[in-house]
Image (tube, rainbow, N blue to C red):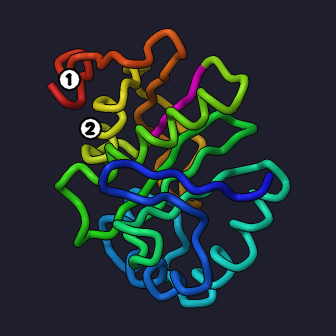
Amino acid sequence: MEPVALTTPRLTLSAPRAADIDAVYAACQDAQLQRFVPVPVPYERFHAEGFVLELVPEWWRDDIEYVFGIRRAPDAPLMGVVAWQRARGYIGYWLGAAHRGDGVMTEAVAAVIDWVFTHEDVDELRWEATAGNLGSALVAQRTGFRWDGTGRISNVRPGQEEGGWRAVLRREHLGSVQPAAEWPVLG
């Protein structure tokens, strides 16, 4: 598939491009991001170059994973990414530290969810996070995911504990939000 762009009232979501390499590199230096997102540690500039210039275009072309860079406007700096792993059905995301806390990620994830359910023949999306990633859990809960429990997760850095949190968003749940009290990690 060719990359597509999505817009929301405050954001533009489009495939990361060469001009985003520095922003990806800088964001991936954050200790909190490194704790919760399975990026290489230490994260070197060549990792950002490979992600932006090789992996993202390959994943779009081969229908493996659709990665959307989050921006305030089409030409604005990259703030983070939302990705849908098509084959496995997972939504994943990260946001640079300076951009957290004002609903950017919730808005971006909601846009990708709407796009997936509108343009793909899928009945559910899945989310998982390393245990302790409350920010990611809040975004998942606020975008309609339903708590699915704890246990082994697939997306961990080698040597990292495999335990984590899981949730599911089914087509019939679109437009509704499970109360935070029903998420044991948020209540």
| Residue type at numbered disc 2 | Leu
Q: Is residue 90 magenta?
A: no
User: In the depicted view, which residue is nearer to us: 73 or 177?
Assistant: 73
User: Horizontal placement of 138 versus 168: left or right?
Assistant: left
> Is residue 70 shown above or below 185?
below
> Is residue 101 shown above or below 17?
above
Expressed as whole percent of the image width and height from the top left, the position of residue 38 reads 52, 60
User: In the depicted view, which residue is nearer to us: 122 or 161?
Assistant: 122
Expressed as whole percent of the image width and height from the top left, the position of residue 82 reads 49, 53
Q: Give the farthest residue toward the top.
A: 172
| Residue type at numbered disc 1 | Ala
Expressed as whole percent of the image width and height from the top left, the position of residue 145 reads 40, 25
User: In the depicted view, which residue is nearer to us: 129 or 138?
Assistant: 138
The crowd level at tag 1 (other Cα within 10 Å; few <14, some 14-19, many 20+) is some
Q: Main secondary structure of the magenta part?
A: strand
Q: Quadrant of residue 107?
A: top left
Which contiguous range is marked in magenta?
A: 124-128
What residue is drawn where x is 41% and y is 27%?
150
Q: Quadrant of residue 129?
A: top left
Q: Give the farthest residue toward the right.
A: 62
> Is residue 147 shown above or below 32?
above
Secondary structure of residue under mark 1: helix
Estimate the spatial distance between the alpha carbons at disc 1 and disc 2, rounded to whole Å.
Answer: 8 Å
What residue is drawn where x is 19% and y is 30%?
186
Residue tagged 2: 138
Expressed as whole percent of the image width and height from the top left, the position of residue 20 reads 51, 81
Secondary structure of residue under mark 2: helix
User: Horizontal placement of 49 versus 94: left or right?
Assistant: right
Q: Say the numbered circle drawn on residue 156.
A: none
Quadrant where the image shows the C terminus: top left
Q: Say the numbered circle drawn on residue 180.
A: 1
